[in-house]
Amino acid sequence: MATSQPVPTPSPAPGGDRPAHDAPALELDALRKTYGNVEALKGVSLRVQPGELVGLLGPNGAGKSTLVKIACGLVRPSGGGARVDGAPAGSAAAHRSLGYLAELFRFPEWLSADELLGLHQRLAGSDGGAAERARLLGDVGLTEAAGRRVGAMSKGMQQRLGIAQAMVGSPRILLLDEPTSALDPAGRRTVRGLLEALRDRGVAVLLNSHLLSEVELVCDRVAIIARGEVVAAGTPDELSHAGGVEVETAAGVRRYEHARRDDAPGIVRELVAAGEEVYGVRVLRSSLEDAYLEAVGDG
Amino acid sequence: MSAARTIAAFTLRESLRRRVFLVVALLTAGFLALYGLGTWQAYRTIDEFGATGESGVDAEIVVGATLLGLSMFGTLFLGAILAVFLTLGAVRGDAERGLLQPILVRPVSRPTLLLARFAAAATVCAAYTIAVFIAAAIITWAFGGWWPDRVVRPSLELGMAVAVLTALSLAGSVVLSSTANGIAVFMVFGAGLTAGLLGQIAEAIGSSTLDDVATGAAWVLPFEALYQAALAGITADTVGFTRLAIDLGPFGGAENFGALLWPWALVYLGLVGAAAVWAFARRDL
């Protein structure tokens, strides 16, 4: 039996309930980016609505991190537009609405966890004070490490602290680039619970991850990017399609590749009528991994 | 301005914590100790020969001014080391290490970040340089009884010279990697010093062409002009044969660049800052 660790539920942040408006949390419109002769993004459009958890998948060099960095205002697009909570990406208003955790990040090693969050509170203009810092550290399971220096933390702890840092000031959208790459399974479960709780509070999340199982578990929608383009998008269910029916008979396992769940009773009837002994039936579905490999052309 | 204050305070705290500051503090202690020993020994020697000879040259002034002038070179060099090492990786280096991005996704503009980092680093470096200069002047006075003709203005000029170097290093950090930037700024620093040496040579051989080149270079690299002005300031009231004797030493190239020097230094800071802001705005992180 798998041991289960309690998943912390972030309590509503003071001042976190900002006036609702119609603007998508993130809106990318025909976004292009070229580095010299290399086209990193070739007109990517994507919307993330408030309270939506969207996964961004793609092979290395597909343009995922570039896309996230453009949304953060760290990289200038070559064409198209990006808006965060209705404001142009890179503007102060956009920065006030977002929280970001980079794939490769470092914090000053001499700061304690509490001091780091305090620094980001001042930069973000958050008036949450000590209560917000304690809440965020609790959300990522670092309450006991509040006074510990960043340099004395493990990589996993630093990643948790990075997630807490991204949540400073109760942003309306979180852009997380590989936020669980350094975490153990328990840590991943904690972060998963955290993301779900944030979604319930209306916070939008764009999750850039290589961990397909994680994306499948937690995301409402998935966009797969390859060679700078969105090659597939939809809910995890939409992307993972029917993969046939498998029937175990006395003569061995028979596979009906184009059959669907509704076809299973008819198949069993026919086999029984033909004198076969049926021991089991399994409806097959392709996984998100299959869909991913098919979309990026490696399947 | 709240974000600027936060970043400046953070940078100040970081500067004082960094190992380079400890190294510079140890170097400074060694430098001042050796300077004290040298000054004591120099004045002991001239006491044995008599302070003022028949030539009319006041040896106490010549020795004090020469020693303090040499110490100003050391002070400027230590200030330059501090300025370079505190800022050489401030933008590109920090971005490559992933330190900059978490700050820049906050409502902090890039010019604000640059300005705040400059203000903090320049404050630390200028304060350090002024403190070492004053300490050297006190040591000279304690062992030789000589006090410079001007103190406040030369100390401010040295502080401003280091602030200019800080700005150049910070601007360089936008476009160059840390190592390349460090090398580039020290080469610029060396070019300034070479201009000063050219001035000395021009003075010695009476070459107006060489003097023009040296003066032009000092205007282009105003930290050198500020250093020379500071050097000129400590013996501003000294005249006669003593003056001539002083000019044979490191003061040969010293020059008071007049009332336009400070406005030009401020404009120069503005130009370097504008170039840095322009380059930073176009930099993908």
Image (cartoon, helix red, strand yellow):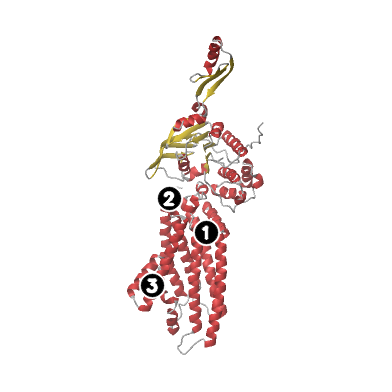
Q: Residues within 10 Å of mark 2 (few under 14, many from 20)?
A: some
Q: Amino acid at mark 3?
A: Leu
Q: Distance of mark 2 from mark 1, alpha carbons?
A: 21 Å
Q: Residues within 10 Å of mark 3 (few under 14, many from 20)?
A: many
Residue B212 is situated, as x and y percent measured from the top left of the image, at 34, 71
Q: Which residue is mark 1?
A: B120
Residue A154 is situated, as x and y percent measured from the top left of the image, at 61, 47
Q: Which residue is mark 3?
A: B198
Q: Distance of mark 2 from mark 3, alpha carbons?
A: 38 Å
Q: Residues within 10 Å of mark 1 (few under 14, many from 20)?
A: many
Q: Which residue is mark 2?
A: B281
Residue B237 appears in the picture as rendered: yes
Q: Are marks 2 and 3 on the same chain?
A: yes
Whichever of callouts 3 and 1 sits on the residue coming sooner in the sequence is: 1
Q: Amino acid at mark 1?
A: Ala
Q: Are marks 2 and 1 on the same chain?
A: yes
Asked which secondary structure carries label 2, the reply is helix
Tell which of B19 and A30 is nearer to you: B19
State yes or no: discs 2 and 1 in contact (Cβ < 8 Å): no
Q: Nearer the viewer, mark 3 or mark 1?
A: 3
Residue A69 is situated, as x and y percent measured from the top left of the image, at 47, 43
Residue at 53 percent of width and 16 percent of height: A262
Q: Amino acid at mark 2?
A: Ala
